[in-house]
Image (cartoon, grey):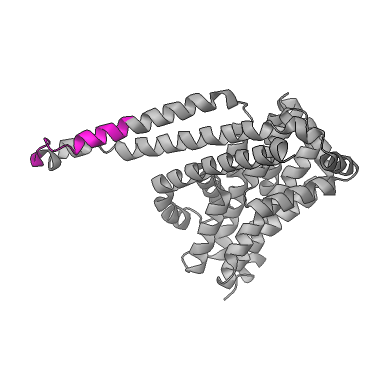
């Protein structure tokens, strides 16, 4: 069991998280410094906040990062609690981009993408070394044209890291998929599937616990997509786990709110209320979600990705009108 399940799972998970973090850090370095101003200036209404939250999360590839950033602005008094509600709704939509990309089943492109990213990085590194060679005159360093010619270094290097991170993410999923035959013969996994077929709560609980433990809903969803793609798990149970994972991702925000202001705590609990409410609303309709996603794609992995996207978009749109209720302004802590 250690060699057939645990070791490949840990290796695949490590590669997946390494890729996710590499993408997140590179994207934050590229555009993250501008997001504070965007969040402050472009969230006058919940609808604006939803659009900005969706775009910011899609860019940073991390709903947690955008949520924590919003909480930081609220704690600093730079953003009011009502203005964060739309951002929170948007983060759940923006986070679907990663799983939709994974659902395209482009794992075979992982190694070529990694090779291309490494080559791109080496080219910029070699050109950078040539720029610093002693035979370069001091006049070159002060030449505005030469400096402008190398302004593309950092964006290209960031792009190389992002591509490499995505490639590692795909490789990690491929490694985790390799455990499917061993998992199917596991008595514990069979027991879980039998219980989950009887009650959707088992799938919800599994998604919540796994996501709360690893602090990454994308990683858990990636694992589930891998299991469903090789037939180790029925799509309906996978969708239930995904809904639970969306609730589990709230744990990180709640932990980040500890020690913050009352408004920051309200942001974290609003995020939790949205995801818990959405899970409670859609849990009875897992079969319908599976039917709609199956109509959109025949691939089990894509069906999981589409179901998550439908769930998050519908939850956010249903909750959006509530953000305009005058009572929310009275809930704002002093």
Q: From the image, give the main secondary structure of the stretch colored magenta.
A: helix
Q: Residue furthest right?
A: 198
For the N terminus, which image quadrant?
top right
Front position in the image: 140 or 110: 110
- Residue 283, horizontal then vertical, whole percent: 81, 46
Residue 208 shown left or right of residue 22 in the figure: right
Q: Is residue 305 visible?
A: yes
Q: Residue at x 74, y 46 (%)?
A: 243
* In this view, 105 is above or below 275: above
Residue 36 shown left or right of residue 135 in the figure: right
Front position in the image: 287 or 159: 159
Which picture quadrant has residue 130? top left
Q: Residue at x 85, y 40 (%)?
A: 187
- Residue 136, horizontal then vertical, whole percent: 12, 36
**Stretch of the chain drawn in magenta:** 123-139
For the C terminus, which image quadrant?
bottom right
């Amino acid at each position: 069991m250690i060699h057939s399940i645990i070791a490949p799972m840990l290796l695949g998970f490590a590669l997946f998280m390494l890729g996710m973090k590499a993408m997140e850090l590179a994207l934050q370095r590229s555009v993250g410094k501008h997001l504070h101003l965007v969040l402050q200036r472009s969230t006058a209404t919940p609808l604006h906040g939803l659009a900005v939250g969706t775009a910011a999360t899609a860019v940073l590839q991390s709903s947690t990062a955008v949520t924590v950033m919003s909480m930081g602005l609220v704690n600093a008094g730079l953003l009011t609690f009502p203005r964060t509600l739309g951002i929170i709704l948007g983060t759940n939509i923006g986070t679907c981009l990663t799983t939709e990309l994974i659902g395209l089943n482009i794992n075979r492109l992982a190694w070529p993408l990694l090779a291309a990213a490494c080559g791109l990085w080496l080219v910029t590194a070699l050109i950078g070394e040539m720029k610093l060679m002693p035979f370069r005159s001091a006049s070159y360093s002060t030449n505005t044209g030469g400096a402008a010619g190398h302004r593309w270094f950092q964006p290209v290097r960031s792009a190389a890291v992002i591509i490499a991170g995505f490639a590692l993410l795909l490789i990690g999923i491929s490694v985790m998929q390799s455990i499917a035959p061993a998992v199917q013969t596991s008595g514990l996994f069979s027991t879980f599937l039998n219980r989950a077929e009887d009650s959707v709560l088992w799938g919800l609980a599994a998604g919540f616990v796994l996501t709360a433990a690893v602090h990454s809903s994308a990683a858990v969803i990636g694992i589930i997509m891998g299991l469903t793609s090789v037939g180790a798990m029925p799509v309906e149970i996978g969708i239930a786990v995904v809904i639970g994972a969306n609730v589990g991702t709230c744990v990180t925000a709640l932990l980040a709110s500890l020690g913050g202001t009352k408004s920051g705590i309200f942001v974290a609990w609003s995020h939790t209320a949205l995801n818990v409410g959405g899970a409670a609303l859609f849990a009875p309709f897992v079969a319908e979600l599976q039917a709609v996603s199956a109509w959109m794609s025949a691939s089990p992995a894509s069906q999981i990705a589409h179901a998550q996207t439908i769930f998050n978009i519908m939850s956010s749109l249903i909750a959006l009108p509530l953000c305009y209720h005058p009572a929310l302004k009275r809930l704002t802590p002093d």
